[in-house]
Image (cartoon, rainbow, N blue to C red):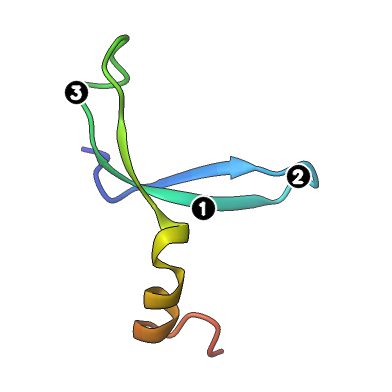
Amino acid sequence: GDSGGPMIAKLKDFSWVQLGVVSFGYGCAQAGFPGVYTRLSQYTKWLYDNTDLGRF
């Protein structure tokens, strides 16, 4: 499935940003059933402390 995939958005300057990670959902974009995502902004410090992000 899509779990672990990126939730992305295009900004006004036409660049892209990843906002979240797909957690789970019911079927494939089923009406009336929300998709569930993890918000990356809540984990920014952890990501920088525990990965090589920003170190290249």
Whether the residues at callouts 2 and 1 have beta carbons within 8 Å, the answer is: no
**How far is disc 3 from disc 2 in space, using C-alphas?**
31 Å
36 up-or-down from 16: above or below = above
Q: Secondary structure at mark 1?
A: strand
Q: Secondary structure at mark 3?
A: loop
Quadrant for the N terminus in the image: top left
Q: Amino acid at mark 1?
A: Gln
Mark 3 is surrounded, within 10 Å at the Cα level, by few (under 14), some (14 to 19) or many (20 or more) other residues, namely few
Residue at 39% across / 66% down in the picture? 43
Kindly identify which numbered label has been placed on residue 18. 1
Left or right: 18, with 6 as reference point: right
Instruction: Please provide percent x and percent y for residue 26.
Output: 19, 23
Q: Nearer the viewer, mark 3 or mark 2?
A: 3
Q: Amino acid at mark 3?
A: Tyr
Instruction: Please provide percent x and percent y for residue 47.
Output: 39, 75
Mark 2 is surrounded, within 10 Å at the Cα level, by few (under 14), some (14 to 19) or many (20 or more) other residues, namely few
Instruction: Please provide percent x and percent y for residue 52.
Output: 43, 85
Q: Which residue is mark 3?
A: 26
10 up-or-down from 47: above or below = above
**Residue occupying the far bottom of the picture:** 55
Picture quadrant where residue 11 is located: top right
Residue at 47% across / 59% down in the picture? 41
Q: Amino acid at mark 2?
A: Phe
2 up-or-down from 28: above or below = below
Left or right: 23, with 46 as reference point: left
Mark 1 is surrounded, within 10 Å at the Cα level, by few (under 14), some (14 to 19) or many (20 or more) other residues, namely few
Kindly identify which numbered label has been placed on residue 14. 2
46 up-or-down from 29: above or below = below
Residue at 39% across / 85% down in the picture? 49
Mark 3 or mark 2, earlier in chain: 2
Left or right: 21, with 41 as reference point: left
Between 8 and 46, which is closer to the camera in this rendering? 46
